[in-house]
Image: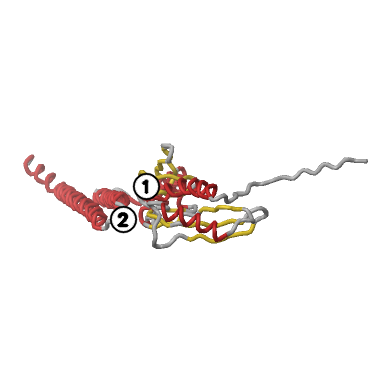
C-alpha cells in the first residue's frame, strides 16, 4: 500500500520535474548561444575597425563592447523569462534607472557623443596641430571623452570633446603645403618695387620656402602712416612655424640694409603760447 502511495506521489510531481528540467536546459542553451553571439558580434565589430585605417579603433572597441552588453542584457531577460519571472517590470525598472543615470550624467554623455563624432569623422588625428576650444597644440591622444593637447611650452591640456565638437576646429596639419601670412609696412616715400625685390630676395634664400607655388608679395593696404605688404610664402607643413618666426627678422635686417624705412606711429605735439 505504501509503495502504491509513493508511486502516485512521484507520478503527481513528475510533470513539474520534467518542466523544470526542460526550462533549465532551455535556459542553459539560451545562455550559451547568447554568450557566443555576443562574443562574435563584438569580435566582428572590432575586426571591421582594423580593416579601415582612416577610422579609429577606439570607436569600434567601444561599439563592440556596447553591442556585447546589449545582447547579454537581452539574454538575461530571456533566461529569467524561462523561469516565469515577469520581465516587463524589470525592463521598466531598467529603463527608469537608465533615464535617471542619463540625466545625472548628461554632461558626460554629451562628451561621449562628441567623442564618437570626432572618431567617426576624424577632423584631426594624433600628431596634428589644431586650434580648437580656444586652445592650440599638438594632439597627443583622442578618446571617447577628451582630447589631450601638448603646447609648445609643454603644457598638458585635457579638453572635453563636447567643447571641441561644438566649436570651430582649425587643423594646421591637414594639408602638406601651407601658406604663411605675414604683413610688413614701409614708409610712403619708399619705392614699392624696391621693397618687393628685397622681400623676394629674403624668401628665395630661405631653405624651407617652396618655389612652387611661388611666394605672394603684394601691396595689401594704404594705411595712415604706412604702405602695407601682404607676404605669403609656401612651405611644407612641418616648417610652418620655422618660417613664421624666422622670416620677419630676416626681412627687417634686409630692409635696414637697403635703407628702407619701416614706419612706426608718431605723435606731433603743438604748443601754442597765449599772448
Name the residue at 42% across, 47% down: 242
Locate the C terminus and report the quarter of the image it occupies.
top right
In this picture, residue 113 sits left or right of residue 70: right
Q: Nearer the viewer, residue 24 or 210?
A: 210
Location of the N terminus (image quadrant): top left
| Residue at disc 2, secondary structure | loop
Q: Earlier in the sequence, mark 2 or mark 1?
A: 2
Report the coloring of the rendering.
secondary structure
Q: Secondary structure at mark 1?
A: loop
Dot 2 alpha-carbon crowd within 10 angstroms: few under 14, some 14 to 19, many 20 or more: some
Residue at the limit of the structure toward the front, as seen here:
258
The part of the image, by quadrant, that contains residue 220 is bottom right
Query: Would you name the residue on which mark 2 appears?
Result: 55
Q: Residues within 10 Å of mark 1 (few under 14, many from 20)?
A: many
Q: Is residue 166 visible?
A: yes
x and y, in percent, of residue 103 in the image? 47, 46
Q: Residue at x 6, y 41 (%)?
A: 3
Q: Nearer the viewer, residue 240 or 29?
A: 240
Q: Residue 221 at what x, y percent from top left?
A: 61, 59
The residue closer to the viewer here, 206 or 39, is 206
Closer-to-camera residue (105/10): 105
Q: CA distance from mark 2 to mark 1?
A: 13 Å
Residue sticking out furthest to the bottom = 213
Q: Which numbered marker is on residue 144?
A: 1
State left or right for residue 39 relative to residue 103.
left
| Camera-nearest label, 2 or 1 | 2
Image x and y of residue 37, in percent: 21, 54
- Residue 113 visible to an observer of this rendering: no
Q: Position of residue 128 (x, y in %)?
A: 38, 49
Amino acid at each position: 500500500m505504501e509503495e502504491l502511495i509513493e508511486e502516485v506521489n512521484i507520478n503527481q510531481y513528475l510533470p513539474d520535474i520534467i518542466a523544470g528540467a526542460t526550462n533549465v536546459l532551455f535556459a542553459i542553451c539560451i545562455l550559451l548561444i547568447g554568450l557566443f553571439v555576443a562574443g562574435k558580434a563584438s569580435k566582428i565589430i572590432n575586426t571591421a575597425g582594423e580593416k579601415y585605417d582612416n577610422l579609429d579603433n577606439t570607436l569600434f572597441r567601444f561599439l563592440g563592447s556596447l553591442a556585447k552588453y546589449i545582447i547579454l542584457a537581452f539574454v538575461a531577460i530571456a533566461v529569467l523569462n524561462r523561469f516565469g519571472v515577469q520581465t516587463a517590470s524589470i525592463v521598466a525598472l531598467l529603463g527608469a534607472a537608465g533615464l535617471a543615470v542619463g540625466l545625472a550624467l548628461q554632461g558626460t554623455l554629451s562628451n561621449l557623443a562628441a567623442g564618437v563624432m570626432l572618431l567617426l569623422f576624424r577632423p584631426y588625428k594624433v600628431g596634428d596641430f589644431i586650434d580648437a576650444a580656444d586652445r592650440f597644440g599638438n594632439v597627443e591622444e583622442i578618446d571617447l571623452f577628451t582630447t589631450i593637447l601638448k603646447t609648445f611650452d609643454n603644457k598638458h591640456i585635457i579638453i572635453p570633446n563636447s567643447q571641441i565638437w561644438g566649436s570651430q576646429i582649425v587643423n594646421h596639419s591637414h594639408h602638406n603645403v601651407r601658406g604663411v601670412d605675414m604683413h610688413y609696412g614701409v614708409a610712403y616715400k619708399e619705392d614699392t618695387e624696391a621693397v618687393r625685390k628685397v622681400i623676394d630676395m629674403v624668401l628665395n634664400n630661405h631653405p624651407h620656402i617652396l618655389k612652387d607655388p611661388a611666394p605672394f608679395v603684394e601691396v595689401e593696404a594704404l594705411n595712415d602712416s604706412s604702405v602695407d605688404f601682404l607676404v605669403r610664402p609656401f612651405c611644407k607643413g612641418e616648417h610652418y612655424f620655422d618660417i613664421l618666426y624666422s622670416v620677419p627678422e630676416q626681412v627687417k635686417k634686409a630692409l635696414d640694409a637697403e635703407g628702407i624705412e619701416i614706419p612706426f606711429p608718431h605723435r606731433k605735439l603743438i604748443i601754442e603760447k597765449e599772448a
